[in-house]
Image: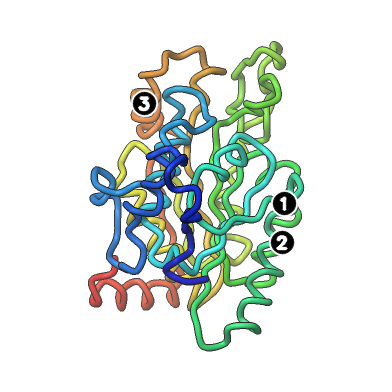
Amino acid sequence: MSLKIYKVNEEFRDIVPKEVLDLEEKATWGNPKRGVMDLPYAKELLEQHSLCAGCPESAAFRYILASLPNPEDTIIVNSTGCTSLVFPHIALHTVHSLFGNQNSVASALKRVLEWRFPDKVKDVVVLAGDGATVDIGLDMTLQSFFRQEKITTICFDNEVYANTGGQDSGETPKGMEFKMAPGGKQWDKVPMWQLAVDSGCHYVAKLSVSSPKRVEQVIKKAIYVAREVGPTYVHLYTPCILELGLNSDQGLWEMRQRDKERFKFFEYMSEEAKKVIEEKKKEGLI
């Protein structure tokens, strides 16, 4: 892994689409102070990605990728779901795991990287949906917290199984109806962010992606704390506008509505995490 993380073969440069070349030529690697303010000038995700038009997950991807402090030495582990469709369209090391076991794969990767590169920082970030994180993969998610694995877990919570027809999930709010859940959810939403706190995570945040700068701050805090202390968890609201019956331009509106209620900003830091964050702030990295 190096600053040449993504390089288009010279023999194909004349036929490769410009937006693919831009992933290489407009990258911001090698700059630990990179962030969402670079997005108008940088390229993190292909415009012709595979998510639906107006999907908030595409915005979340851009914000997260722009906020990684060390992308050239970062591996993202993803799982089956809408998120997994996007990874062929970014210029970053990624590993696709089976549905639900992403935290187990990430744990192994982090340990191997520490053994293989003992003198170099290698960040491992899990990025998966609410089904993989909270439902099918809950055991492996929590076990990575219990073991104090130094990885960051990011959950894209759209509160529904969006890419399999619209079934409710553990993160669906009580009473909400979907095409394949017409009776409405019968139980309350699982407070995964509180489970993360109770299970030993040193930094935990819950928010929507309506504010790019806040997402950047949260991601940087989570990764720096995971490097030095232990597991961190970020719970992001990325609503499925298709399943909610919204227009492609209404994702931001939907997130701002939920910012006032179930996705009101929540942040937890252990004492060890607070020290790391204060140090990084003094260095101008957060």
What percent of the width, then of the height, locates residue 277? 35, 71
Q: Is tag 1's residue or tag 2's residue first in the polypeptide sequence?
A: 1
* Residue type (three-letter) at the residue carrying disc 1: Ser
Q: In this view, does 127 lie to the left or right of 263?
A: right
Asked if the residues shown at circle 1 and circle 3 are in contact, with their CB atoms under 8 angstroms apart, the answer is no
Question: Can see residue 170?
Answer: yes
Who's the residue at 29% across and 65% down the image? 286
Mark nearer the viewer, 3 or 2: 2
Q: Is mark 2 on a helix, strand or loop?
A: helix
| 142 relative to 5 in the view: left or right | right
Mark 3 belongs to which amino acid? Gln
User: Which residue is found at the position 69% from the left and 11% from the top?
Assistant: 182
Residue 186 in view (yes/no): no
According to the picture, the residue beneath numbered tag 3 turns out to be: 257
Q: Residue at x 25, y 77 (%)?
A: 283
Disc count in the image?
A: 3
Q: Which of 253 and 19 is in front in this view?
A: 19
Residue 272 vertical placement versus 265 (above, below): below
Dot 2 alpha-carbon crowd within 10 angstroms: few under 14, some 14 to 19, many 20 or more:
some
x and y percentages locating residue 215 in the rendered image? 36, 49
User: In the rendering, at what x and y percent does residue 116 appear?
Assistant: 64, 83
| Residue tagged 1 | 97
- Distance between mark 3 and mark 2 Cα atoms: 35 Å
Q: In terms of sequence position, does the residue under pointer 1 or pointer 3 come before the other?
A: 1
Mark linked to residue 105: 2
Q: In x, y percent, where is residue 146?
A: 68, 68
Query: What amino acid is labelled 2 in the image?
Result: Val
Dot 3: element = helix
In the picture shown, does residue 210 fall above or below 163?
below
Element type at marker 1? loop
